[in-house]
Image (cartoon, helix red, strand yellow):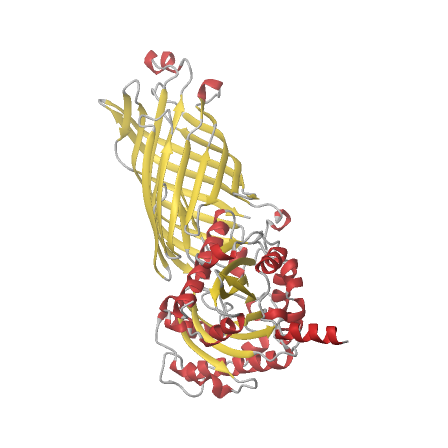
Amino acid sequence: MKPLLASLLLLLMAKPIISAADAVAELAAFSVFDKVDINALAKSDVKTEKVPPMSNARFLAVQSCYVTSGAPAKQIEALRQWNPSKHRELKIFLHSDLPRSPSTTDFSKLKNAPDNGSVRALVADTEKMSSDLQISREEAKKFSSGGEKGGGGAMPAPVAAFWAELLNARARSFASGGTSAQSPYDHTGEAIKPGDELNGLLKQQDKIRRQFSVFLGETGIGRGAGSLGPELYWELLDVDDKGVLTLGASYSRAGGAGTYQAADVLYYASGGYYVALTLYQMWPVSADGKPSTLVWRGDMISSASLASLHGVERLASEGAMMKDISKAVTAFRKDTGR
Amino acid sequence: MRIFSRLAFIRAAGTALFFVAVPIFAEETNSSFDWFKPFSSLSGEYTAEETYVSDADVRRGNRAIHNFDESDTILRFVLTPRVKIGVLRLGIEWEHFSFGFPDRTPLPNTLQEISAIIGLDMRLSDSILLRIESQPGFYGTNNFDFNQMNAPFIAGGTYIYNPNLQFILGVSVDVEREYPVIPAAGIRWKIARQWVINAVLPQPRLEYEATKNLTLYGGGNIKQTNFRVDDDFGNEHGKPALNHAVLTYSEARAGIGADWKIAPSLTLTAEAGYQPYRDFDFYRAEVRFHEDGSSPYGMISLHGAF
C-alpha cells in the first residue's frame, strides 16, 4: 500500500499545472481552435473566431482564446473583481449586485437612472406597454401608470416600481428555479422562453455542451436551480439606443489539475436580445516558463434582430461581435495588468 | 464576474458595401407571417421594381424630342449561400427601359440587359468587408445577340469604424464605358436613433425611421449602363455611324419615398420625385442627347431578403 499512498500524496502535492500539450489538445477537442501555440498566444492579442452558422437564425456565437499570466484561480478572481462600467463605450448606465434572495429595494437605483435618450425610450415603451417590451402578458397587466409621480430621475416612480417588481420576481424565480422558471416573453407576440433559448444555443454547439455538461448541470442555466450558488446582478444598459434592463448570473467551479470553468448568463432582458451566455474554460499552463492561464471563451447570443440578417449583414454582425469581444478582453487584460 | 461588452455589437446599425447599403442589424418586425418560411433553408434576396417617368424632353443641338415617357422595370433574384470564405452571390437580373419616343427618333425605344450575378462577399477582418461582383450578360436593345455581351464588375470595401459609422471605397469597371474605371467613396452614418445618412452610390439617402416597420427617406438614384444597339440601327435612323454602337444611358432621380416592411422578408417601397438629369450618349460616334427639362417620376418596388 505504501507506494500507492506515496503516489497519491505526490499527486495531491503536485503543482496544479497540466502540460501545455494536454491543454491544447483539450481545447482543440471542443472548440474551433484546433492548433494553438501557447507561447505565441501569450505574446499576442486575443484570438477570435466565428463558429459555423447555426440553424436558428436568432443565434450567433463567437469563440476566443488567449493566454494570461497567473493561475486560473487568480483569473477567476480578477474577473469577479473587474468593473467594466468605467469603460464608457459599454454604455452600462447602472450595475448592481444582488443577494441570493433579493427584494425590490435591491432595485432602488432605478430611481437614479440617468436622463438620456435611451432611458427615455425605455420609459416611453413602458408607459405605453409597447409590444417591444420583452415581458410576459401577466407581467404587463401589473403596470399602472397612476399613483405617485416623479422619482427624482429620468424614470417616473410608477415605471421604476413596475420594473423593480418585475426584476425582483424574475431574479427570485431564477434563484429558486433556474432559467426554466422564467416566464416567456409572450407580451411581444412571440412565445419566447429564455430557458429554451439557452438550451437551443447549447444544443447547436454540441461539443461545447458536452465539454460543460457536468458544470452546467450544477447551474440554473437552461434548467432548474442547480447546486452551485449563482452570483446575481442586474443592469441598465443601452442596446440599439434604447435602455434595456437585464438580469444576470455568474457561476464558476474548479476542476481537476487547477482548471476552472465559469459561466455568465443574461437570463432576462427587457429588449434588444433574448438571452446571452458566456462560457469560460481555463487551464493552468506555463508560457515562457511563467505560470499562466490558457483561457477559452465562448460567447453566444439569441436575438430577434439577428433573425432578420442575411448574407453580408450576417458577416458584418459576426465581425462586429468578434471586434467587441476582442476589445473587451483587451480592456480586461489591460485593466488587470495581464 | 459579469459578461462584458457582449452587447455593444447588437445595436441596430448598418454597414454599406460599395453600391449597396444594408443594415448590420435590420430592425425587428412584429409581422408574424413570413412568406418565405418554406425557403428558410435558402438565403437570398430579390427585387421587383417599376419606375414610370413622364413628360421628358431631351435635346441634341437643334434637335429636340419632347414629351416622351419612360418605363424602367427591374427583376432581380440572388441566392446568397454561405461558404467557408464568405457569402456567394449567384443570381440573375433583368432591367428593361422602354421609351415612348416619337417616330424616327434616332434613339432606341428599348434598352435592356439580362445578366447573371456572380459575386462574393468576404470579411477580410473584424472591421473590413469586401465585395466583388460581376454581371456578365447581354446589354442591348430589342433583340439580343452575342455581340452585345459585356461583363461589368464592381469591387469595393467597407470599413466598419463602429456600428454607427462606416466608410466605403470601391471601383466600378466597364470596358464599354467612356471611362472604364470609376472610383467612388461613401459614408453611412447613423447620426441619431432614427436618422441615418446613407451616402452610398447609387442610391444616397437620408433616412428617418418613423416606426419599426416604416422608414421615410429623401435621396437620389444614379443609374448608368452601357448598351450596344443593333447592327443596322444607324442605317435605319440615317446615321450609319450608329450601327452596332455603344450607347451609354445615364439618369439621375431625386425624390422622397417610404419603405414599409410588410413581413420579415417583404418590403414595399414607394417613391416619387423629379428626374433632373438624363443622357443618351453614343460617345464613340459623338452623338449625344441630354436632358432638356426635368420630369416627374414614380416608383414602386417589392424587395426583401430571406
**Of B228 and A201, the residue lying toward us:** A201
Which quadrant is home to the C terminus of chain A? bottom left
Q: Residue at x 48, y 60 (%)?
A: A288
Q: Classify residue B181 as left or right of residue B304.
A: left
Residue extending farthest front: A2
Q: Position of residue A12 (x, y in %)?
A: 64, 75
**Of B40 and B54, the residue lying toward us:** B40
Q: Position of residue A95 (x, y in %)?
A: 44, 77
Q: Residue at x 40, y 69 (%)?
A: A337
Residue B150: image quadrant is top left
Q: Position of residue A279 (x, y in %)?
A: 56, 66
Residue extending farthest left: B62
**Of B3 and A78, the residue lying toward us:** A78
Q: Position of residue B119 (x, y in %)?
A: 49, 37
**Of B45 and B59, the residue lying toward us:** B45
On screen, residue A322 above or below A311: below
Is residue A35 visible to the viewer in this orientation of the structure?
Answer: yes
On screen, residue B34 above or below A134: above
Which quadrant is home to the N terminus of chain A? bottom right
Q: Residue at x 53, y 70 (%)?
A: A72
Residue A159: image quadrant is bottom left
Is residue A185 visible to the viewer in this orientation of the structure?
Answer: no
Residue A111: image quadrant is bottom left
**Count of numbered circles in the view:** 0
